[in-house]
Image (cartoon, rainbow, N blue to C red):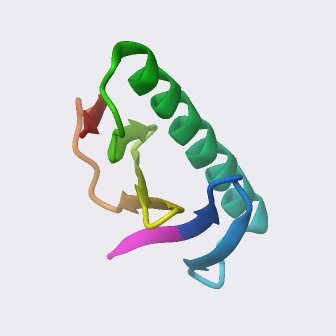
């Protein structure tokens, strides 16, 4: 069993749609959308500075919450999930082109 949130935003960071458990606080959706948009903008800027072109996805983990931010068809997709069974010692970030 996992807790999961899916957020779809436009390229300006406005939430277009989201899917979450009914008990998920609205503040969590807002925080994840801001975090996802910030990660998208930072990654896009970094990719442009070092000449990577369009970076398609970034994965990172914060306090056991695994977050994936990707851009698809002019939309920013944020997926966050926390497994009830956490793996000790995991952390870091990965970017894919």
* In front of the other: 11 or 58: 11
* In front of the other: 30 or 50: 50
Q: Residue at x 57, y 69 (%)?
A: 8
In the picture, residue 21 is in which quadrant?
Answer: bottom right
Which residue lies most toward the top here?
A: 50
Q: Residue at x 46, y 37 (%)?
A: 62
- Residue 71 position, x and y percent, is 43, 55
In the picture, residue 93 is in which quadrant?
Answer: top left
Report the predominant secondary structure element of the magenta stretch: strand
Quadrant of the drawing holding the C terminus: top left
- Residue 34 position, x and y percent, is 69, 47
* In front of the other: 65 or 48: 48
Q: Residue at x 27, y 58 (%)?
A: 85
5 is within the stretch colored magenta: yes
- Residue 68 position, x and y percent, is 39, 51
Residue range of the region highlighted in magenta in the rendering: 1-6
Name above or below for residue 5 compared with residue 27. below
Name above or below for residue 34 compared with residue 3. above
Q: Residue at x 37, y 38 (%)?
A: 60
Quadrant of the drawing holding the N terminus: bottom left
41 is within the stretch colored magenta: no
* In front of the other: 38 or 91: 38
Position of 59 with respect to 12 (left or right) is left
Total marks placed? 0
Which residue lies most toward the bottom here?
A: 22
Name above or below for residue 24 compared with residue 38. below
């Amino acid at each position: 069993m996992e807790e999961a949130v899916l957020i779809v935003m436009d390229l300006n960071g406005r939430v277009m749609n989201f899917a979450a458990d009914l008990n998920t606080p609205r503040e969590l959706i807002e925080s994840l959308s801001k975090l996802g948009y910030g990660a998208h903008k930072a990654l896009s800027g970094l990719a442009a500075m070092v000449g990577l072109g369009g970076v398609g996805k970034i994965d990172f983990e914060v306090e056991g919450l695994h977050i994936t931010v990707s851009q698809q068809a002019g939309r920013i997709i944020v997926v966050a999930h926390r497994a009830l069974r956490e793996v000790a010692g995991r952390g870091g970030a990965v970017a894919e082109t």
